[in-house]
Image (cartoon, helix red, strand yellow):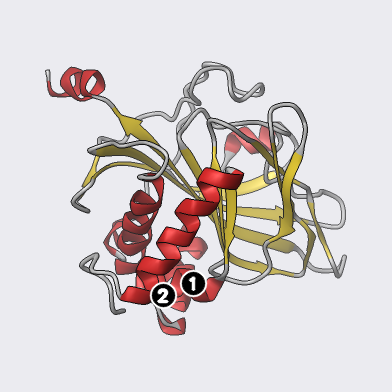
């Protein structure tokens, strides 16, 4: 990997600038794998290593209550504008406000990210790149970064539901979805909407490294169910959902105190 320390090449800086411009103009943007790889300095071997972390996720019991199967982990970090990334204590995940009708105000407990995941240079480079992109939406010294690696599994009898809550927002500043892999899967189309129901973008993430960005303050999103192409084998869809929320001085002071 070339850009582990956060030093961008001229080409990667151009990709970040393009993403920023698109977010400001359209409130959503799809980054192709080649552009993402340039931003983070990743080669195919880096992506293959990173994808291996999705074989070490744990069952999501909350999804099971809704009749679908999903594996996941969760981590929370603070990202400074300098690129420093600080892990926060592992606590329950609570969806901000009333953004998730299935889990309003509910403390959900998920397995923490593994040490290997947190130490992976691709994870660090991706997070710093997202911070650089998010800077166009709000001028913040620090970002609250919440990290959710997901694996959705479908069978002939049970469809996989990446967003069982339907069309929604996450209550953050920037919401992102990075495709890590999919196998024997059909469906899973991602759609981004304005609050009044205008469709801004609709696409199926097929290729590893494809990154969907959305200004969560101005959009809603949903993902169609996933089904097996071959009903005799399970289907899987692996994504990394990362959200960034600007941290203001009052929040920082409360945590310090």
| Residue 201, horizontal then vertical, whole percent | 71, 50
Q: Distance between the residues labelled 1 and 2?
A: 5 Å
> Would you identify the image quadrant in which residue 179 lies?
bottom right
x, y percent for residue 24: 51, 44
Marks 1/2 in contact by CB < 8 Å: the verdict is: yes
Q: Is residue 141 left or right of residue 195?
A: left
Picture coordinates of residue 173, whole percent (x, y):
45, 35
Residue 176 can be seen, yes or no: no
Q: Can residue 254 be seen in this view?
A: yes
Q: Is mark 1 on a helix, strand or loop?
A: helix
Q: From the viewer's perspective, is 155 left or right of 9?
A: right
Above or below, comparing residue 124 to residue 140 in the picture: below
Graded by Cα atoms within 10 Å as few (under 14), some (14 to 19) or many (20 or more), the crowding at tag 1 reads some
> Residue at position x 76%, y 70% from top?
184
Residue sitting at the far left? 257
Q: Residue 38 shows which numbered tag?
A: 2
Q: Residue 35 carries which label?
A: 1
Could you tell me which quadrant the N terminus lies in? bottom left
**Does 235 sit above or below residue 139?**
below
């Amino acid at each position: 990997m070339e850009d582990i320390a956060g030093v961008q090449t001229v080409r990667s800086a151009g990709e970040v600038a393009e993403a920023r411009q698109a977010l400001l103009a359209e409130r959503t943007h799809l980054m192709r794998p080649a552009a993402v790889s340039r931003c983070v300095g990743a080669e195919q071997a880096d992506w293959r290593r990173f994808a291996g972390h999705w074989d070490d996720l744990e069952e999501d019991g909350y999804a099971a209550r809704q009749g679908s199967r999903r594996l996941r982990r969760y981590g929370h970090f603070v990202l400074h504008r300098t690129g420093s990334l600080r892990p926060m204590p592992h606590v329950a995940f609570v969806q901000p406000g009333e953004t998730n009708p299935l889990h309003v105000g509910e403390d959900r407990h998920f397995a923490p990210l593994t040490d290997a995941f947190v130490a992976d240079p691709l994870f660090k480079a991706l997070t710093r790149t997202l911070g650089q992109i998010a800077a166009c939406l709000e001028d913040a010294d620090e970002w609250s970064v919440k990290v959710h690696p997901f694996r959705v599994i479908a069978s002939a009898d049970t469809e996989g539901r990446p967003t069982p809550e339907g069309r929604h927002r996450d209550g953050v500043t920037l919401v992102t979805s990075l495709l890590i892999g999919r196998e024997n899967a059909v469906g899973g189309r991602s759609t981004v909407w304005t609050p009044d129901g205008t469709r801004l973008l609709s696409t199926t993430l097929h290729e590893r490294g494809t990154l969907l960005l959305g200004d969560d303050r101005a959009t809603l999103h949903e993902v169609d169910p996933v089904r097996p192409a071959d009903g005799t084998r399970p289907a899987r869809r692996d994504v990394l959902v990362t959200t960034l929320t600007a941290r203001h001085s009052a929040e920082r002071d409360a945590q310090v105190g």
